[in-house]
Amino acid sequence: MRVTVCELPHEPAALESAWCDLCAHTARESSELVLLPELAMVEPLWETERFDLARWRAAEELCDGWLARLSELPVAYVVGTRPITIDGKLFNEGYLAFADGGVAPLRRKSLLPEEAGSWEARWFDRGDALFPPFSAGTMSFGLNICTELWALESYAEYARRGVQAILSPRATATSTMAKWLAAGVVAAVRSGAFSLSSNRVDPTGACGGMGWIISPDGQILSTTSCDVPFVTMDIDLDASTAARATYPRYVFR
């Protein structure tokens, strides 16, 4: 499958420009699937300690508008996350969008930080504790949203169930990029799956960009940067099947 990872700003003018560039890139590169950053397009509500219902509702409305625009990307699939209210609870929910404009819900983020600059537990309710596999065409994938990259126990289950890629939308800081990249390598090596991640980026460094594509054996195949904000590659899904038969995956059977 031909996949695209990216880094995107959220500020309206910068986002509109980056979006046009992403649409052009995916058309030129014949991408099949685009992974967007965590809660792409909306302001970083969680950086504020005090919850504000008016800002939450504005973020939902803005995201709904952008969901309607995802078909501008000339691809079969788009994966991202969105703020959504369900039965009075507020979630950070993964979604799989299709070329025809349809949007299917995936799992909801369950691991929520609560500290300065990342007050997610005050803005979101906890979602799904389980990490089931999903499908986009022929690709089986898991969704570990940002902090959930550290849910190491999920990787054994992915290996057991034959997941071929772990998709991780992020909102992580410039100062922590090395540790997040290390988590992506561990995710790939333990599960025998490709690790794909896209990140938000903003001028403050609170979100520092750097999306990645990592092979099932932990090789960093490509990363994004401020100069190269989009990366598209073919990933061989059969490589994941082969990797699960090799060390260290086979010792856990």
Image (spheres, rainbow, N blue to C red):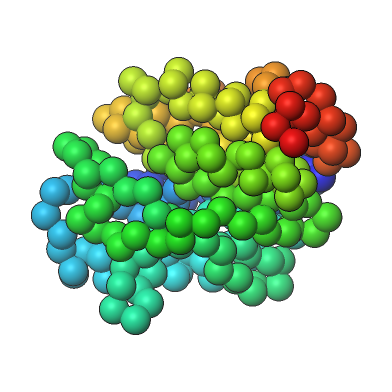
Q: Is residue 163 above or below residue 230?
A: below
Point 40% across, 62% down: residue: 127
Q: Is residue 79 visible?
A: yes
- The quarter of the image holding the C terminus is top right
Residue 101: image quadrant is bottom right
Residue 127 lies left or right of residue 49; in this view the side is right
- The quarter of the image holding the N terminus is top right
Residue 234 lies left or right of residue 35; in this view the side is right
The residue nearer to you, when weighing 38 against 217, is 217
Q: Is residue 4 visible?
A: no
Q: Is residue 199 above or below residue 248?
A: below
Point 45% across, 56% down: residue: 129
Q: Residue furthest bottom?
A: 87
From the top left corner, tell me how far across and down residue 154 is, in percent: 56, 44
The residue nearer to you, when weighing 173 against 9, is 173
From the top left corner, tell me how far across and down residue 245 is, in percent: 84, 30
Q: Is residue 242 above or below residue 82?
A: above
From the top left corner, tell me how far across and down residue 171 is, in percent: 39, 40
User: How many numbered marks are there?
Assistant: 0
Point 63% across, 39% down: residue: 156
Point 79% across, 33% down: residue: 244
From the top left corner, tell me how far across and down residue 111 is, in percent: 37, 48
